[in-house]
Image (spheres, coloured by chain):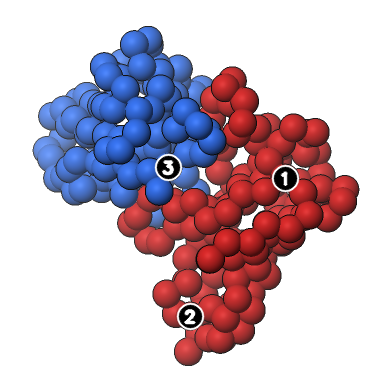
Chain colours: A blue, B red
């Protein structure tokens, strides 16, 4: 099946710093990528939809200036958490949609801890 | 997007068949039903997808009655490694305009030795 990678898998940073998370589709081109956030023992919450070459569409309540999303190519999307605070600590997961069956394939996730 | 309802949690012994039912009363004509599996600290993994009747792959079976208002994921002879959260989602994956997936709370399956 299609493979989606994320980097880094785990990051710890100080409050006030910015963190960039990469999401790559390894063996297919993804016109659309999605970013989710998951808190402990909760379901995935969609943050934004990222389309290659255009601005991301953010879900209600998600600050676009805080969570910067760039989808510069058909295989790479990045999420930058700007001026991170402890409440931003979470598990961030991306997914990519193939162009054939439109099934979403998920990355392994990135654990962000803000001290 | 059609809303789904699943049991919050289920327990099962090793070797048993597990059936997880999902209700989706307002499913649309063009909606498909997709199930994902998620282990702790990992991204969800696609399990199976169907539109009607029965779909089977090497991992699971999906049963969908004629009215399509519910579906049942069947896991044969579960093992400890099947302990995970299972999500049922309903949408139109074949349409190019299908733009996002909304996850419900899922069903936490615990397999007991």
Front residue of this view, candidates A2 and A15? A2
For residue A28, above or below residue B73: above
Report whether mark 2 lies on the same chain as mark 1: yes
Residue B54 falls left or right of residue A72 = right
State the residue at coordinates (65%, 32%): B92
Whether residue A67 is visible here, answered yes or no, is: no
Residue for point 44% across, 80% down: B80
Depth check, front residue: A55 or A68 = A55
The kind of secondary structure element at disc 1 is loop
Q: Is residue B85 above or below residue A27?
A: below
Name the residue carrying label 3: A105
Image-quadrant location for residue B91:
top right
- Cβ atoms at labels 3 and 1 below 8 Å apart: no
| Residue holding disc 1 | B51
In percent of the image, x 80 and y 33: which residue is there?
Answer: B29
Question: Residue B24's spot in the image, x, y percent?
Answer: 76, 46
Q: What chain letter is assigned to the residue under label 3?
A: A
SS of the residue under disc 3:
strand
Chain designation of label 1: B
């Amino acid at each position: 099946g299609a493979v989606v990678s994320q980097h880094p898998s785990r990051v710890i940073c100080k409050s006030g710093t910015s963190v960039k998370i990469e999401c790559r589709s390894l063996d297919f081109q993804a016109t659309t990528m999605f970013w989710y956030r998951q808190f402990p023992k909760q379901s995935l919450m969609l943050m934004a939809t990222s389309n290659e070459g255009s601005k991301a569409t953010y879900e209600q309540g998600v600050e676009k200036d805080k969570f910067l999303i760039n989808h510069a190519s058909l295989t790479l999307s990045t999420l930058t958490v700007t001026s991170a605070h402890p409440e931003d600590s979470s598990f961030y997961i991306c997914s990519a949609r193939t162009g054939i069956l439109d099934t979403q394939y998920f990355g392994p996730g990135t654990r962000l801890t803000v001290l | 997007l059609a809303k789904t309802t699943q049991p919050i949690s289920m327990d099962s012994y090793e070797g048993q068949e597990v059936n997880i039912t999902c209700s989706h009363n307002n499913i649309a004509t063009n909606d498909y039903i997709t199930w994902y599996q998620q282990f702790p600290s990992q991204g969800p993994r696609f399990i199976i997808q169907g539109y009607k009747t029965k779909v089977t792959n090497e991992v699971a079976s999906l049963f969908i009655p004629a009215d399509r208002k519910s579906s049942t994921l069947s896991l044969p002879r579960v093992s400890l490694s099947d302990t995970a959260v299972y999500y049922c989602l309903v949408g139109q994956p074949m349409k190019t305009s299908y733009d996002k997936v909304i996850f419900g709370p899922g069903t936490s399956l615990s397999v007991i030795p």
